[in-house]
Amino acid sequence: MKKLPVVGVIVLFLGMTIFSSTGTIIIPQETYQELIEKPTFNAILSIIEVRGQLFFYIIAKIQNKLPDAFENINWSIVVDGGIIFCGRKTYGTIPEIRPGQIINLFSNPIFGIGKIESTVRIHANSDLGETRVTCDGFVFGPFVLIERW
């Protein structure tokens, strides 16, 4: 069992109330693993991983889980917080992503110091919405560390 702290909240999960008097949510370990390992997605693309590269970069892996190919996917990696000397914002466009394809997105080289919050956004078009993941991390010179999300 995995205990997650809460503050006076009753949560419904799979039709069951899972609130205990100690102020924690109790979830079976298998369900907790599924929840934390489940990628963030919308109807189009999944962000399946965000990690820091040992030197200078943030890398995000995205995957098309639908049977259709998509074109002109706009993406961005934005770093907030800390003192960032270079690499705060990176933007790009993916010309095409085929069904099942996984693509790595690399930020511009990052150099700075301090606690950061990095946001990865993928936007296919105005009708289909946006996928977004925000991760906490730390930058120390060229070293970029991202907490697992």
Image (cartoon, rainbow, N blue to C red):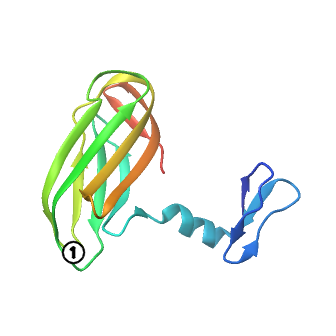
Please name the residue shown 30% across and 29% down the image.
88
Q: Position of residue 80 (x, y in %)?
A: 40, 30
User: Left of 103 or right of it: where is 15?
Assistant: right
Query: At which x and y percent is residue 111?
Result: 29, 24
Q: Considering the numbered disc 1 on the image, is that residue within a helix, a strand or a loop?
A: loop
Q: Residue at x 54, y 69 (%)?
A: 34
Q: Which residue is found at the position 29% from the left and 56% from the top?
A: 61
Q: Is residue 34 visible?
A: yes
Q: Quadrant of residue 82?
A: top left
Q: Specify few, some or many for label 1: CA neighbours under 10 Å numbering under 14, 14-19, or 20 or more.
A: some
* For residue 75, above or below residue 136: below
- Farthest right residue? 21
Q: Could you say which quadrant of the image residue 110 lies in?
A: top left
Residue to which mark 1 is pinned: 99
**Could you say where residue 105 lies in the image, as x and y percent from the top left?**
23, 50
Res 1 visible:
no
| Lateral position of residue 10 relative to residue 111, left or right | right
Q: Amino acid at mark 1?
A: Pro
Residue 83, above or below 37: above
